[in-house]
Amino acid sequence: MIKERTRVTRHYYLNQGDMNDTQQYVPRHILVVEDYLDSQEITCELLRLMGHTVQGVTSAEDALAYLQDNSVDILLTDINLPKMSGVELAEQAIRRNPVTHVIFASGHANFDLKSVGFSARLLSKPFDLDTLTRALDAAR
């Protein structure tokens, strides 16, 4: 496990060296909303290894409770959540803090981002470290 963490961390920071001089790596505060606990924990761990501050929750309701007292730079949410969808969650999060960036994670490649009515990125599940990194970089 530690060997894998080192490899992942080294890979990410090596990629950061590819950025041009005007870009700087800035750790972000990210809220991960994923109802499958294993997926949530892996995503949170990857993000922490990348240097971000991360909070993981399993429902939109828990996310809204967290956002009551905390602001985040990025909301990374599954689209299909029980009770309230990730899209509904993102709408409420943006109403509370309009500078929040949204990244949707979905196993359905045919999801149309234009239908949500606000700026967002889409990560197709399953995603790898490079894809996650590109989505985070695009959410600036």
Image (cartoon, rainbow, N blue to C red):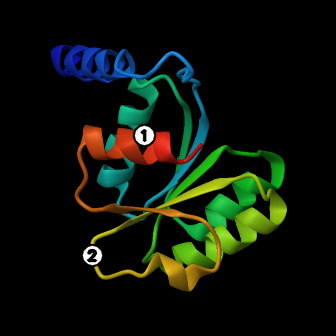
Locate the C terminus and report the quarter of the image it occupies.
Answer: top right
Residue type indicated by callout 1 = Cys
Q: Which mark is residue 106?
A: none
- Dot 1 lies on which element? helix
Circle 1 is placed at which residue position?
A: 44
Residue 66 % position (x, y): 71, 53
Q: Badge 2 is on which residue?
A: 109
How many numbered callouts? Answer: 2
Label 1: few (<14), some (14–19) or many (≥20) C-alpha neighbours in 10 Å: many
Question: Where is residue 28, by image quadrant?
Answer: top right
In front of the other: 1 or 120: 120
Q: Determine whether, in the image, residue 43 is placed left or right of residue 56.
A: left
Residue 23 horizontal side relative to residue 45, left or right: right
Tell me residue 41's x, y (percent).
37, 44
**Residue found 45% across the figure and 28% down from its top:** 48
User: How far apart in space, not on screen, are marks 2 and 1 (Cα)?
Assistant: 22 Å
